[in-house]
Image: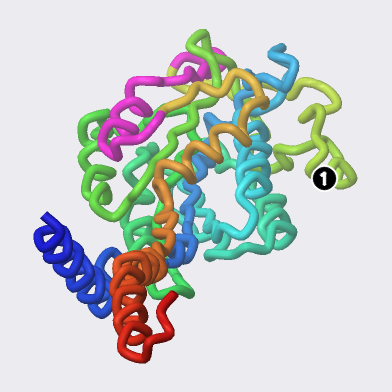
Amino acid sequence: MRTTMLLVRRLLLAAAVLGLALGVGQRDAVPPADPLELDVVVVLDRTTSMAAADAARSDDSADGRTRVAAALVDVEALAAALPGVRVAVVTVGEEATLRAPFTTDAEGLQRQLDQVLVEEPFSGTGSTLATGTDLVADLLARAPATGEEPARTAVVLLSDGEQTAPAATARGTAEAWAALADDVDAALVLGYGTREGATMPADAGRVPPLGSSPDAGTDATTDRAAPAAPLIDPATGQAAVTRYDPVVLDAVADALDGTVEHRTTLAGMPDLATALAAEAIGDPDAGTPGRGTLWWWALAVALLALPEVLRGTRRALDRTGDAP
């Protein structure tokens, strides 16, 4: 029996020594991955219909704020909610224009937004939200990144959804945006206006959307000191009415596998921005903590070797006659 126990102990000791030598179970720590970068392309509709004053303010009441004014406030809130995120702004109407290249400078971005005016009435042959897709595709292809990993990308479209070009359809517009889907990690479509619709001012495109005076700046609690004369439809002789069109916006959101939100209030933009960033970036790699097992193996070797040490010591003492 003693011989068997001795054999088992020595086998365990040999295994422990081998485990110690090989570092079995030892794991080095893996540091967390560097935070992923995010580039956001904002696409702002500046067609004449965006001058309709049926957008809401923060208390959910219609107060004469134009659609484009509400959209500009949302762009400002988006940039403020995503500090360090690079934002580019494209405005679309008859043509697409790069209003601001990718930047993290919120003040510089705001200065560019302050210059945005809607298109003047009858300045083109009709509008379609497919206009800006080529420019957006180019921006996505050149999205900057400073780290080893490519930056994640997101698109935010702000529009009332109305298209007036003769051949414009929701399906055709969605197909144009769908061509960008592989290059977009997250998308948010924000809609402005009401289904009941509203008239547009005859002087649309000639006055700032954020206030009736140069001193109004970006505060803009109202858009005008007094209502302007409505834009007249030459075909009917009546005031032209523009309506929020969710069908087009839903189609674009579906094409980009994104989220659509009808903005009836100016509240909640920080939450929408945070959700957009989370969808684009996903859960960051938290890394793996290290695991040290060498001391466990060393302890096992010591405990298993102790009887052998005591046994050898006793034998040595027996030979010298010093054993008790």
> Vertically, is 228 above or below 95?
above
Q: Nearer the viewer, residue 151 or 249?
A: 151
82 sits to left or right of 243: right
- Location of the C terminus by quadrant is bottom left
User: Does the stretch in magenta take in 231?
Assistant: no
Q: Quadrant of residue 193?
A: top right
Query: Hey, which residue is sitting farthest top in the picture?
Result: 196
Q: Residue at x 32, y 58 (%)?
A: 137
41 sits to left or right of 267: left
Identify the image's colour scheme: rainbow, by chain, secondary structure or one colour. rainbow
* Residue that carries the numbered disc 1 in the rendered image: 217
Q: Residue at x 56, y 57 (%)?
A: 85
Task: Give x and y (percent) for residue 222.
Answer: 80, 27
Q: Is residue 142 visible?
A: no
Query: Hey, which residue is sitting farthest right in the picture?
Result: 215
Q: Quadrant of residue 270?
A: top right
Query: Hey, which residue is sitting farthest bottom in the picture?
Result: 320
User: Which secondary structure, mark 1?
Assistant: loop
User: Does the stretch in magenta take in 239?
Assistant: yes
Q: Quadrant of residue 238?
A: top right
195 sits to left or right of 21: right
Circle count: 1
Q: Is residue 9 visible?
A: yes
Image: magenta residue range: 236-259
> What kind of residue is marked 1?
Gly
Q: Residue at x 82, y 45 (%)?
A: 217
> Vertically, is 289 above or below 212?
below
Task: Give x and y (percent) for residue 122.
Answer: 49, 37
- Location of the N terminus by quadrant is bottom left
Q: Residue at x 58, y 32 (%)?
A: 271
Task: Give x and y (percent) for residue 247.
Answer: 33, 21
> For the residue carrying disc 1, how many other residues have a C-alpha within 10 Å: few (<14), some (14-19), or many (20+)?
some
